[in-house]
Amino acid sequence: MSLRIGMVGGSVGGLFAAVLLARQGHRVTVMERARHGLARRGAGLVVQEPVTRILRQVGLPRLAEKGVWAAERIMLDAHGAVTSREASPQMQMSWDLLYDGFRKLLPEHLYLTGATVGEAVPSPDGVQVVLEDGRAFGFDLLIGADGQGSMVRGLVAGNGAEERIRPDYVGYAAWRGLVPEAAMPPDAAGELFGRMAFHNGRGMHALGYLIPGAEGETAVGERRYNWVWYRPLSPEALQDLLAHAGRAGALSLGPGELPADIRASLQADARAQLPPQFAAAVAAQAQPFVQPIYEYETPRMVRQRIALLGDAAFIARPHTAMGVAKAAGDAMALAAALDGRPVDEALAAYERARLPQGRAMVDYGRRLGRSLSMSP
Ligand SMILES: Cc1cc2nc3c(=O)[nH]c(=O)nc-3n(C[C@H](O)[C@H](O)[C@H](O)COP(=O)(O)OP(=O)(O)OC[C@H]3O[C@@H](n4cnc5c(N)ncnc54)[C@H](O)[C@@H]3O)c2cc1C
């Protein structure tokens, strides 16, 4: 039976599911609020087994081989000396290549951009959706792949569940940067490139590694250095920061949104607290951004004809490096469940398969946060 399926969110989670479901003969419509799609907005990701598997399923196995390798992991002390070294090859793939690869597999007219879902009204056998620009659609099944600030969550959690749909801020934030390879000071580049570097300080954790360029480039000279500095930030200080940046109520601050005075104090703190190689990377970053760390566990993934997928369902701390892999696992499980089964039975099977996985991943992220002496 060919279903009319609405996908809220056209990032990688929504695209994974849309491509698999369209190939099964379902009539899929992806509704993505970003006006021009999401091209060239990502960074790097560690290729986990579910990503390799979904790439194989859709006939793009070579994409997982396009990345930047780090040969070893090193630990730096506050003075920049290497205190441990471990051969542990790991590749960072380009998020943009993954997005572009899947986007090309979906006929253009099935992916609507500038399409913000404003309202969705469920009934026992379908969902009526109204976009903010007034366009309306009827679907047999609606999938919420709308990420960490998901609006579809509210429909799955049910009435009066507001407090259960907001992600929990865990009390620390990742200050981040993506420095063009050529802009890195040579001394720091010499020690940091080609390896994953880490530093553990009192209540803080920093790391850095090379990732592909903005167009997926992997050639020397065209890559980017990705640094991440986890530091405690109280909920009140986070609210003050967002307000100071003119982004009160937002979940994070993107490149270009950090006020100049905060960038200056970030650089001063980096000079005082980080190994000099990392401080140099922070100083080389024209537009640092801030990713407060959130967690979310949905109590259920399905209600009537609505299902959640990816970050809309579960947000684990980024130390797990499994966000994309989890979205791929959800998409494959949903497509497998819907292949030939009645819808309600399929959705129940999907939830049974993926609820425990999502909970386990959130728990794993929490344990990793504790092991890095970050917040509780
Ligand atoms: C631009 C971008 C770049 C990213 N880069 C990386 C990266 O480099 N490495 C990495 O590991 N992870 C990255 N992520 C996060 C990663 O995609 C997720 O952690 C994970 O893969 C789960 O994906 P998702 O599709 O569930 O959620 P997300 O990737 O968060 O996508 C949710 C999508 O839903 C859309 N949306 C939200 N609300 C609505 C609405 N009401 N109507 C219509 N659309 C809506 C958003 O615009 C967004 O595109 C990125 C996410 C985005 C959006």
Image (spheres, grey):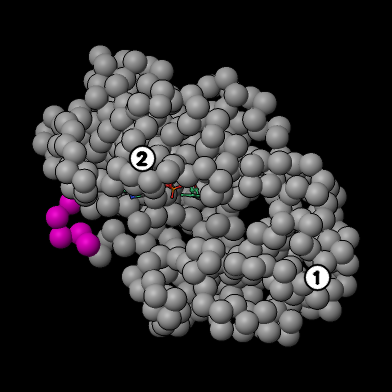
Write down the residue under mark 2: 113
- Residue at the limit of the structure toward the left, as seen here: 123
Q: For residue 78, what is the image quadrant? A: bottom right
Specify whether 295 is left or right of 121.
right
- Evaluate whether residue 326 shows in this view: no
> Percent position (x, y) of residue 165?
28, 58
- Dot 1 surroundings within 10 Å: few (below 14), some, or many (20 or more)? many
Q: Amino acid at mark 1?
A: Gln
Residue 2: x and y in percent read 26, 16
Q: Is residue 196 magenta?
A: no
Mark yes or no: residue 279 visible.
yes
* Secondary structure beneath label 2: loop
Q: Nearer the viewer, residue 20 or 340?
A: 20
In the depicted structure, whether residue 339 falls above or below residue 18:
above
Give the main secondary structure, helix, strand or loop, of the magenta stretch: loop
- Mark nearer the N terminus (1 vs 2): 2
Kind of residue at badge 2: Thr
Which of the two residues, 93 or 313, is positioned nearer the viewer here?
93
> Where residue 362 sits in the image (x, y, percent)?
47, 55
Span shown in magenta: 157-162
* Residue shown at the point (60%, 24%) measured from the top left: 60
Residue at (13% x, 42% y) in the render: 121
As displayed, is residue 74 above or below residue 57? below
Q: Which residue is mark 1?
A: 277
